[in-house]
Amino acid sequence: MNKVYFVLLMIISGWMFGVQSSINGALGKRIGVFESSFFSFLLGTVVLLFVVIFFGKGNFWTFTEVPKWQLIGGLLGVFIVTSTILAVPNIGVASAVFAIMLGQIMISIVIDHFGLFNVPVIPFDLLRLTGVVLMIAGLFLIFKGNLSS
């Protein structure tokens, strides 16, 4: 598959994250932050159960054989979703999502540079630094725009 398709897939995923953040933020105001996180993960679990049953091609039960650090993704997801539910009603969707993206880029650059978690090493350079600095400026401008409205 052409790598451009993967970039497009991730752009669409980013759109879904923005929509999800808005929906979860609204739900959190109605039923509670932790209750909203719970419902979000419960519904996602039910959907994924059906996907695994009908379309899964892997070996689900080999999870007992993987390094334990590879199993904490769900815990990290709980933190991310719950943080988003807390932040969106207070700073808006754009600021919350942009801040998450900035955090993702920052840690991704560290992971790439050191080849952590068995990813290929991509050294830190001036272009990447410039990208992060521009994103910090962008976050500042988007957040500042929240304050003026």
Image (cartoon, rainbow, N blue to C red):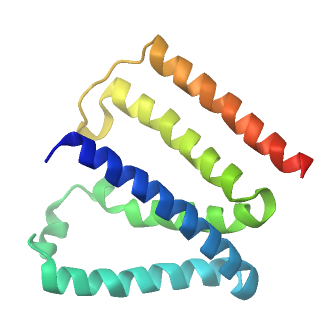
Q: Give coordinates of residue 127: x percent, y percent.
A: 46, 16
- Please give left or right for residue 117 compared with residue 57 in the image: right
Q: Nearer the viewer, residue 106 or 137?
A: 137
Query: Among all residues in the image, which is located at the extreme right?
Result: 148
Q: Give coordinates of residue 32: x percent, y percent.
A: 71, 83
Q: Give coordinates of residue 12: x percent, y percent.
A: 41, 57
Above or below 76: residue 99: above
Above or below 83: residue 101: above
Query: Could you tell me which residue is drawn at 38 percent across and 33 percent down?
Result: 111
Above or below 17: residue 33: below
- Please give left or right for residue 131 compared with residue 73 in the image: right
Above or below 143: residue 123: above
- For the image, the number of numbered tags is 0
Query: Could you tell me which residue is drawn at 26 percent across and 42 percent down?
Result: 4
- Please give left or right for residue 4 compared with residue 146 in the image: left
Query: Among all residues in the image, which is located at the extreme top?
Result: 126
